[in-house]
Image: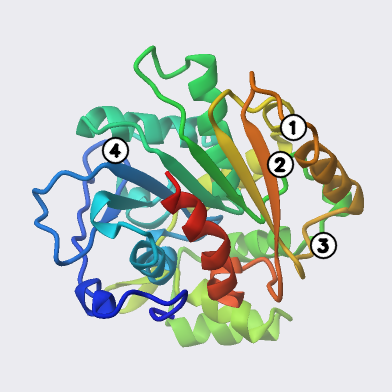
Amino acid sequence: MARILGNKPGLHHLLTRFTISRRPLQTLAYEELRPSDVDPQQPYRSTAFILHGLLGSARNWRTFSRSLLSNLSDPSGWRLVLVDLRNHGKSAEIEGLNPPHDLVNAARDLADLVGTQGWDWPDVVLGHSMGGKVALQFAESCALGDYGDSAKLPKQLWVLDSVPGEVSRDKSDGEVEKVLQTLQSLPSSVPSRKWLVNHMIELGFSKSLSEWIGTNLKKQGDHETWAFNLDGAVQMFKSYLEKSYWPLLEHPPKDMAIHVVRAENSDRWDPDVVQRLGSLANREANGSEGKLSVHVLPQSGHWVHVDNPKGLLEIVAPRISSL
């Protein structure tokens, strides 16, 4: 995957090592990626935040993010920040990320991270699934002034296979709800990852999904326990279902480009939602507002960075490079 999009000769071997940094002090945990040939003290010009989905973590996006960085036109000028959202990954261990566990607070965590670390505001925010809605909430809150006068809107917002409106339970296939209910029925620790995977398969879940759930375990003594805060994640999923960002898509803030990527084979999209998005994207440009673009990722289901990472890079990398 590192040779995708015709990398410049010799570039890939310079990008095989990255600076990883975590700040577990009342702010979100994160990983910071920069090219290995760049002095960590060398200033960067631009920052992109990468946000995972429900029950995921920053590490799920390492491989894609490394490829994305290597395919930008000027990698040395960029820094990618892979965030563990509240209740997920290393952030699940952090005290002080208090309820309510909803998208509003998940987005505010990003603003708090910027403020606590003294960073410039991100130029790009890219989110997958639930992370896509956190990205939309972040932009909406910035536009409303919720983060103060110093807050700056992202220049680009990427929403990867995330339905922007409310998601009614009667139109859902119920798989996510079934997974959450199953996990809630299990003890807080299980004998082993193998036991969990076999148990999930016996309950009728696919092998790939069961193995992915198994990656969210961490060793604790003789047993394995969850790497996420399950109850908090359930509350975040409820907020994901209930929140709608159609007004933001109908009137994007000036100078901000919103890119929605719909996976061709994803089962998350109703025809009316697809039509509505297309109508908004095809409107005549209005100089007083930002721009909404819709992209279809071929040969991909919901897990866009796994199913067709090359196709996703071909959509994302040139547009981020244009900044």
Instruction: Place residue 32 in its image quadrant.
Output: bottom left
Left or right? Give the position of 155 relative to 273. left
Left or right? Give the position of 138 relative to 122. right
Mark 2 closeness class: few <14, some 14–19, many ≥20 residues within 10 Å? many
Cα separation between marks 3 and 2: 17 Å
Nearest the eye: 208 or 38: 38
Say which amino acid is labelled 1: Trp
Judging by the rendered image, the residue that carries numbered circle 3 is: 173
Cα separation between marks 3 and 4: 34 Å
Q: Residue at x 63, y 86 (%)?
A: 207
Q: Residue at x 40, y 62 (%)?
A: 227
Judging by the rendered image, the residue that carries numbered circle 4 is: 27
**Tag 1's secondary structure?**
helix
Q: From the viewer's perspective, is residue 225 above or below residue 268?
A: below
Judging by the rendered image, the residue that carries numbered circle 2 is: 164
Reading the chain from its start, which is encountered first: label 3 or label 1? Answer: 3
Instruction: Place residue 117 in its image quadrant.
Output: top left
Say which amino acid is labelled 2: Pro
Q: From the viewer's perspective, is residue 23 above or below residue 139?
A: below
Residues tagged 3 and 1 counted as in contact (Cβ below 8 A):
no
Nearest the eye: 254 or 306: 254
Nearest the eye: 276 or 303: 276
Residues tagged 3 and 4 counted as in contact (Cβ below 8 A):
no
Say which amino acid is labelled 3: Asp
> Where does residue 311 sit, x and y in percent of width and height?
59, 71
Left or right? Give the position of 247 relative to 13. right
Left or right? Give the position of 276 relative to 193. right
**Tag 2's secondary structure?**
loop
Nearest the eye: 70 or 132: 70
Residues tagged 4 and 2 counted as in contact (Cβ below 8 A):
no
